[in-house]
Structure formats: C-alpha cells, structure tokens
Image (tube, rainbow, N blue to C red):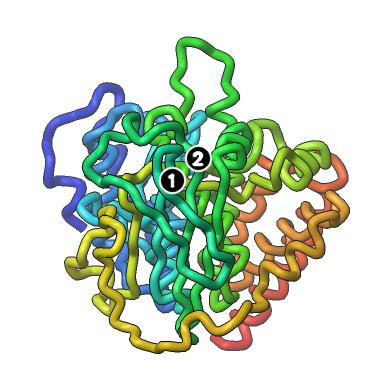
Amino acid sequence: MAYGKQVSSKQAGVAPEQITQLVRSTEQEFASIVAATNSRITFAQEALYAYQAMLGNSYLASVAINNKPSFALAMQQIASSGLTLNPAMGLAYLVPREGKVIADISYRGLMKIATDSRAVDLVVACSVYSLDTFSYNGANDEPVHIYDPFLAKHDRGEFRGVYVKAYLSIGKLLVHPVSAEDVYAARQLSSAWTNTDPTKKKGPWDTHFDAMAIKTGIKAARKYWPMTSPVLDNVISYLNEEGGEGFMGAPVTLDTASREMNGPSVASQGTVVNLHGGAVYENEPTPMGQPQPSAEPASAGEVYDHRQDPARNQGPIQTEGTANARSAGRDENAVLMERIQQVHDRSMRTGAWQSAFDWAHAQLKGDLLEHAQKVFRKGQSEYQAKQQKTA
C-alpha cells in the first residue's frame, strides 16, 4: 500500500511512518466489517483519507498515536456507517476530542444514512427566527415558513428553533419541530460544552453551532421515522457516547442516564439549527466512491421532489416514536441495559468484540461493567462458534 509515501514532510512529534503503521493496523477489522455490512467503501480509499487527515493535523496524529484504541474504534465506526472520509463530500471526519480520536459524522452524513437505508426519501431541516413568519400545521402537513433568505441571521431576530421534514417512501410527510430551549438543553449534555476550563474552547457547539444544532435535530426526528436499518441508531449512539454529544464526560451511571431521559426536555437525542434556508438530502443511487451532489443548504421552495404521490398527507402515522413516547418513564437501569444489548448486537454483526470491551471499560463501572463484560464474553463465544461452523 503506497498511501504512506505520498507526502514526505513530517508532523511535529509524529513521523509519517508511524501514521502509516497505525492506519495499516486497522485494515483487518475494517475489511471484516465492510464485508459483513456489504458496504461500498474500501479500506484502501479510506486509509488514504485517514492518512492525509493526520498528516495535515499534527494534533490529530498525536492523539491517534497516544490513544490507538480510539483510532481503531473510529475506523471501525466509519466502516460500519458506510460513509467515506473523503473531505470533499463532508460526510464524516476524524477529529481529536477529549484525548480520543472520534469518527465525527456530520448532519449530512446522518441524512445520507437515513436515505440510503430507505427509512426516508428526503430530509429537510430549517431554522426559524423570531422575525420569520412560521405556522406549524401538525405532524403530517407542510408548515408555512416565510422569511427573507438574503438577510443575515442576526437580522432575522432571535433563534426560536428548527423543524425537520421527512418524506417517507409511502408518500407520507413527518414534521418534527424542536424549540430553541430544547436545542440549548441538548447542548448542555455535551461534555465539551460543560467544560469549565476557560483556556479551552467549548467544542463543536462553540465552533460549529449550526451544524451541531441540525445534527441534534435529526437525532430527535429520527425517533419518529420507520426502523429500516440499525446503522443510523448505531451512529447516533456512538456520537452520543464516544463523541460526547449526548452524555456528560464521566462514565455512564444511573444518574447520567436519568439526566438524559428526564432532563429539561428529553433533549439528549436532540434539536436543530441555524441554516438560512435549511439542509436537504435526497436518496442518491450513486455509489459512495463516485462524486455526488453536495448537501448544501437550499432555499425554501427550491427543493425538487421527484415523488408525485398526491396521497402524501393522508392522515396521521403511527411510527416508532409513538411507542417511545409511551415509554419515556422507563427505569434508567433498563436504558443502560438496552445500550449494552445494542453494543452486543452490533458486535454480533461485525465481529468487533474488542471494541465492545473497550466501550464498556470507558463508559461503565461497577455492576453495569461486570454485566456488560459477561454479556460480551458470551456473545464473543457464540460468534466464534458460528464462524467456525461456516468456515
């Protein structure tokens, strides 16, 4: 593999050879996950992007070298998500955060996963400000949103919130509004934002509020979309847990889960954004390795929708979110048990058992950690037995 020799300059403290060796060490796990998920991405391609990212960012390279398990987990997440690290597409990035390397999936990436999985055909996310004219007409009808797209954001008044529209393959529309209060409540669950060190930035919420708000909004709206694939939920779980976007920085405890579930507005899963005309992503049949149209914000009313089913707004829809709303008061311990089971199920599909144990050690403690290790050991044995039978 030649990607480690394409650039000869060194980064401070980390030689290109070290980066090459680190990237190569993730190949076997990466390839096995891609094979298991039938992803279109390839290790050779993503290895090149990962190498270039670290060669161009000495701090990222240093964090990766000093925390190799987090880099390996990030590469595994890229493999399982099916998203490319190609910076021109803006779907996923390797970023240093809190001493770890994180596979940071952008809001475009989340939209891409949603449309690729056929959960939805089209996603539109728009921000609303106090000087806009906005009328919410229910969960299954188009809202009315009138504003001047050429005004600067501060000239449109105070940020009020966001709404996410999802067009389903059955011709239905789902509209999910998220208030500014809920956006800010979600931000409070970020470990970077709650960092009190004045010498450090407040993380992506400080530097990229718009993108983080939109991402949070998609997380919130996703609960009401049909369940067609676990990929989107796995990515959201990873971003919340490993990426620090949904939990405080300490290991997960019952108190932490309680804050997530019963906080100001059940906002751990989200809120949304400050894009002038909204963010849009349609279902693209183009393979991931080929150029695709970018998901840049589009002005309201300028989105072409090739679906012409006149029955789009026929009555309310019962979705996964209906059941979630009924179970909002679940016991916090059950939430953590569910997360452990999700990690177990993901490892059963991908074979990434070391990542499961690494996650448990980083996120759990006490009886929860002991329970997770027991579940993962049993699952690993079952997985290995199945592999031997098929060999």
Instruction: Name the residue tied to disc 2.
Output: 160
Q: Is the Cβ of the residue at disc 1 closer than 8 Å to that at disc 2? A: yes
Q: The residue under label 2 is which amino acid type?
A: Arg
On screen, residue 367 versus residue 22, left or right, reads right
Give percent across and percent down for residue 194.
59, 24
Out of 45 and 295, give the one closest to the viewer: 295
Question: In the drawing, does residue 257 fall left or right of residue 9?
Answer: right
Report x, y in % for residue 201: 44, 21
Q: Which mark is residue 203?
A: none
Query: What is the C-alpha distance between the residues marked 1 and 2?
Result: 6 Å
Q: Circle 1: is it few (<14), some (14-19), or many (20+) Cα within 10 Å?
A: many
For numbered disc 2, what is the local secondary structure?
strand
**Considering the image in quadrants, where does the C terminus appear?**
bottom right
Q: Is residue 357 visible?
A: yes
Q: Identify the residue shown where x is 51% and y is 71%.
A: 141
Q: Which mark is residue 128?
A: 1
Question: What is the x, y in percent for residue 145?
Answer: 40, 55
- The three-letter code of the residue at mark 1 reads Val
Question: In this orientation, which residue lies closer to the viewer: 382 or 160?
Answer: 160
Image-based side of 37 in relation to 327, left or right: left
